[in-house]
Image (cartoon, grey):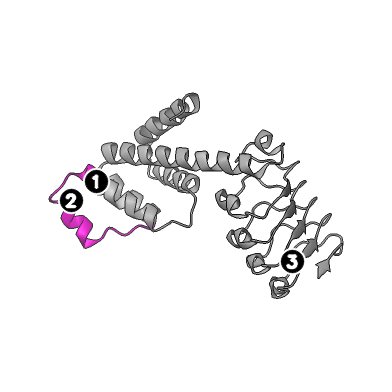
């Protein structure tokens, strides 16, 4: 079954589309679609997806379940980042991400239309982001005051447990902060490392931890100049 040339100026696809589990080809190009259905991964038989010239900004997590997908054209959209797990789409042979404002990976990485190159870049970017986040955790742990730590937990919606309070009386504040931040990271495994970093730095700015932010900014400038 193939669906082609859906109505012009379509802004979204119905969730019911995922019920068409035998669908092999889907052409939704030249519309005004802003997002793909969250359950698009149910289309396990989908081999070809043309969605060029739309307004798609991101790909839902279930997109990575399209294991039969061989041809993908998302050119002319508003994608800024590709999901790291795109390498799991083992059947994918033809890809086109041209004319997107991609930042991760950069546009030039995608120009050759080779999935391996894109996947390898994203893997290295993930490893780099992990190292940067760990360094930020250390900066926060070594420089934050107890009062600011409590404010930070509030901004991150992170409860300080009785165990944490007990730990603070037996170990250093630095160790406690690091343990709590590690737990926060574990509780948000569905969020990208880069997003966690941005969320943390926004929270630090909101509580007025400017000295810590200065150190983090210096770290970011340093990591732009070297490779780990």
Distance from disc 2 to disc 1, alpha carbons, whole Å, reads 10 Å
Looking at the rendered image, the quarter that the C terminus falls into is: top left
Give the image location of residue 121, x and y in percent. 57, 39
Q: Which residue matches tag 1?
A: 146
Disc 2 is placed on an element classified as helix
Q: Residue at x 71, y 37 (%)?
A: 112
Distance from disc 3 to disc 1, alpha carbons, whole Å, reads 49 Å
Q: Which residue matches tag 2?
A: 168
Q: Looking at the rendering, which quadrant does residue 20 occupy?
A: bottom right
Quick one: 120 or 194, which is closer to the camera?
120
Asked if marks 2 and 1 touch (Cβ < 8 Å), the reply is yes
Q: Residue at x 21, y 62 (%)?
A: 162
Give the image location of residue 37, x and y in percent. 67, 65
Disc 3 is placed on an element classified as loop
Q: Which residues are magenta?
A: 157-174
Distance from disc 3 to disc 2, alpha carbons, whole Å, reads 51 Å
Mark 3 burial class by Cα count in 10 Å: few <14, some 14-19, many 20+: some
Q: Which residue matches tag 3?
A: 13
225 up-or-down from 203: above or below: above
- Give me the disc on residue 94: none
């Amino acid at each position: 079954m193939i669906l082609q040339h859906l109505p012009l100026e379509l802004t979204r696809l119905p969730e019911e589309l995922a019920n068409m589990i035998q669908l092999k080809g889907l052409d939704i190009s030249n519309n005004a679609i802003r997002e793909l259905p969250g359950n698009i991964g149910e289309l396990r038989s989908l081999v070809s997806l043309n969605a060029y010239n739309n307004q798609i900004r991101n790909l839902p997590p279930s997109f990575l379940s399209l294991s039969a997908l061989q041809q993908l054209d998302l050119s002319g959209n508003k994608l800024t980042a590709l999901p790291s797990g795109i390498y799991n789409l083992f059947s994918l042979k033809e890809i086109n991400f041209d004319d997107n404002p991609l930042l991760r990976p950069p546009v030039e990485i995608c120009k050759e239309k080779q999935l391996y190159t894109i996947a390898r870049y994203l893997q290295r970017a993930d490893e780099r982001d992990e190292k940067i986040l760990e360094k930020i955790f250390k900066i926060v742990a070594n420089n934050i005051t107890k009062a600011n730590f409590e404010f930070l937990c509030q901004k991150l919606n992170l409860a300080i447990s009785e165990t944490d309070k007990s730990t603070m009386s037996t170990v250093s504040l630095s160790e406690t902060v690091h343990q709590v931040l590690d737990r926060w990271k574990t509780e948000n495994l569905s969020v990208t490392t880069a997003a966690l970093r941005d969320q943390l730095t926004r929270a630090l700015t909101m509580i007025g931890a400017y000295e810590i932010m200065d150190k983090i900014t210096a770290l970011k400038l340093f990591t732009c100049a070297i490779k780990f």
